[in-house]
Amino acid sequence: MSKKILLEKHKDVARIDQTEKRTHGWYVRVRFLGKTHSKFFSDGKCGGRYSSLLAALAWRDATEKKLGKVRTDKHIVTVSNTTTGVVGVRLNDKLNRYEVSWVNGVGKQGKTSVSINRHGKDIAFSKACEIRRKKEAERLQSS
């Protein structure tokens, strides 16, 4: 690894520089199954900015492995704000349909919907969930 690693973005790792509090280092946050695991890596304690970043990345990777979380630099949404309980699938009562949304491998938003009038509520929901699952699998397989 070269020092250009300092210039790259790293998933779940944030730089903290608060001169007034004399706080400089990397903050790592790993979220999995509704729990957050976090740790701060101080430049002073780790031997500098580069060393603290390497320690932070190593801790992140080891923590994900220990928890059983798949290591990827792609953003994965695991919490749903919808009442369906399925990420990317929401019920639109006004239009009587399930709406499906996703982000493709190059970061472009995609959307479609499945009619409840045409398929019935249970089948429409199943179809919407299957569309979402396929689109998420496609995104994670593309590089």
Image (cartoon, helix red, strand yellow):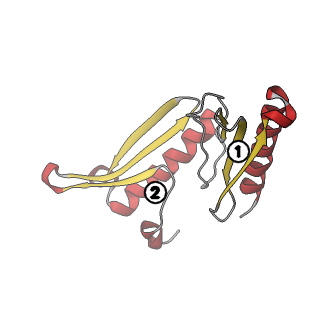
Percent of width and height locating residue 85: 64, 29
User: Which numbered disc, 2 or 1, marks the residue closer to the eye?
Assistant: 1
Lateral position of residue 127 relative to residue 50, left or right: right
Residue at left 17%, top 56%? 19
Percent of width and height locating residue 16: 30, 53
Residue at left 80%, top 48%? 134
Residue 67, compared with residue 137, is above or below; it is: above
Dot 2 amino acid type: Leu
Q: Which of marks 2 and 1 is nearer the N terminus?
A: 2
Residue at left 44%, top 71%? 3
Q: Is mark 1 on a helix, strand or loop?
A: strand
Residue bearing the label numbered 1: 100
Q: Which of 23 and 115 lies nearest the eye of the viewer?
A: 115
Q: Which of 35 and 130 lies nearest the eye of the viewer?
A: 130
Q: Which of 91 and 7 lies nearest the eye of the viewer?
A: 91
Residue bearing the label numbered 2: 54
Percent of width and height locating residue 101: 67, 48
Cα separation between marks 2 and 1: 39 Å
Q: Which of 34 and 124 lies nearest the eye of the viewer?
A: 124
